[in-house]
Image (cartoon, rainbow, N blue to C red):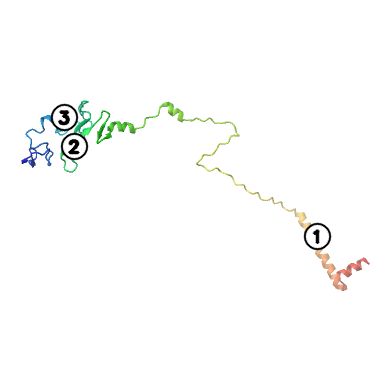
């Protein structure tokens, strides 16, 4: 194994290297950029023109997405396992790996990978039809029956009016009756005072006075 200058960046690389670790130039130690047996499985990148696998999703040289580019026709014999060119996320070196695929979508390591377009279509809900919209709308006609009371909404508390105690009616007392009662009270006081003075004047007790009146 010898070291030779890379034809792209002139950095010394191994003759057995798959790609230059500096500029990712493929097979810098080979006379031809790629083996003739692999040329049929590659196509040029639309951005930088570098050879890329037909099933690659990202160009390992410039990083452009290849999802919208034609990936080529895969024969039924090659439908089970295909080769893809990947770019190392740490050193940037491209490498090739075999990936299992099926007609419905891709699968890596036994896990199914759906196409992004199909996932985007499934994530969008279908618009409701006209019949579904009409079934969701409920039109209520106003009732003319006054006995039917409208029920309050569930989120609203039912209003219960508080009973207010009525104050007892205040009837104004008749002014004439008040005057008569005052006069009667004064007369009773005068009579009681007169009897008291009479008892003290004669020196008799009330019982003796009553006996005196009966005689």
Q: Are marks 2 and 1 in contact (CB under 8 Å)?
A: no
Q: Residue tagged by mark 1?
A: 184
Instruction: Name the image quarter holding residue 188.
Output: bottom right
Residue drawn at x 83%, y 65% as measured from the top left: 191
* Label 2 crowd (10 A; few <14 / some 14-19 / many >=20): many
Whole-percent x, y for residue 118 in the image: 30, 31
Q: Is residue 139 left or right of residue 190?
A: left
Instruction: Name the image quarter holding residue 23.
Output: top left
Q: How far separated are the C-alphas under marks 2 and 1? A: 126 Å
Q: Residue tagged by mark 2?
A: 86
Q: Is residue 198 left or right of residue 146?
A: right
Check disc 2 and report its element: helix, strand or loop.
Answer: strand
In primary-sequence order, the first of circles 3 and 2 is 3
Residue drawn at x 42%, y 26% as measured from the top left: 130
Q: Are marks 3 and 2 in contact (CB under 8 Å)?
A: no
Check disc 1 and report its element: helix, strand or loop.
Answer: helix
In primary-sequence order, the first of circles 2 and 1 is 2
Nearer to the camera, 82 or 172: 82
Q: In which quadrant is the N terminus drawn?
A: top left
Whole-percent x, y for residue 206 in the image: 86, 69
Q: Residue tagged by mark 3?
A: 41
Nearer to the camera, 43 or 1: 1
Whole-percent x, y for residue 141 in the image: 53, 30
The residue positioned farthest toward the bottom in the image shown: 203
């Amino acid at each position: 194994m010898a070291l030779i200058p890379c034809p792209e960046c002139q950095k010394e690389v191994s003759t057995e290297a798959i790609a230059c670790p500096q500029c990712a130039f493929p097979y810098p130690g080979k006379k031809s950029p790629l083996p003739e047996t692999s040329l049929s499985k590659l196509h040029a990148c639309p951005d930088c023109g570098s050879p890329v696998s037909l099933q690659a999703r990202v160009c390992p040289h410039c990083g452009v997405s290849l999802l919208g580019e034609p990936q080529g026709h895969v024969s039924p014999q090659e439908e089970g396992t295909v080769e893809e060119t990947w770019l190392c996320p740490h050193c940037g070196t491209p490498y090739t790996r075999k990936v299992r695929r099926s007609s419905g979508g891709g699968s890596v390591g036994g896990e199914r990978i759906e196409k992004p377009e199909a996932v985007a279509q499934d994530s969008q809900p279908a618009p409701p039809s006209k019949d579904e919209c009409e079934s969701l709308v409920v039109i209520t006609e106003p009732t003319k029956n006054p006995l039917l009371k409208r029920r309050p909404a569930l989120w609203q508390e039912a209003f219960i009016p508080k009973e207010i105690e009525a104050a007892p009616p205040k009837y104004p007392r008749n002014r004439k009756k008040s005057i008569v009662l005052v006069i009667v009270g004064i007369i009773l006081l005068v009579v009681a005072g007169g009897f008291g003075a009479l008892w003290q004047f004669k020196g008799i007790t009330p019982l003796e006075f009553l006996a005196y009146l009966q005689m």
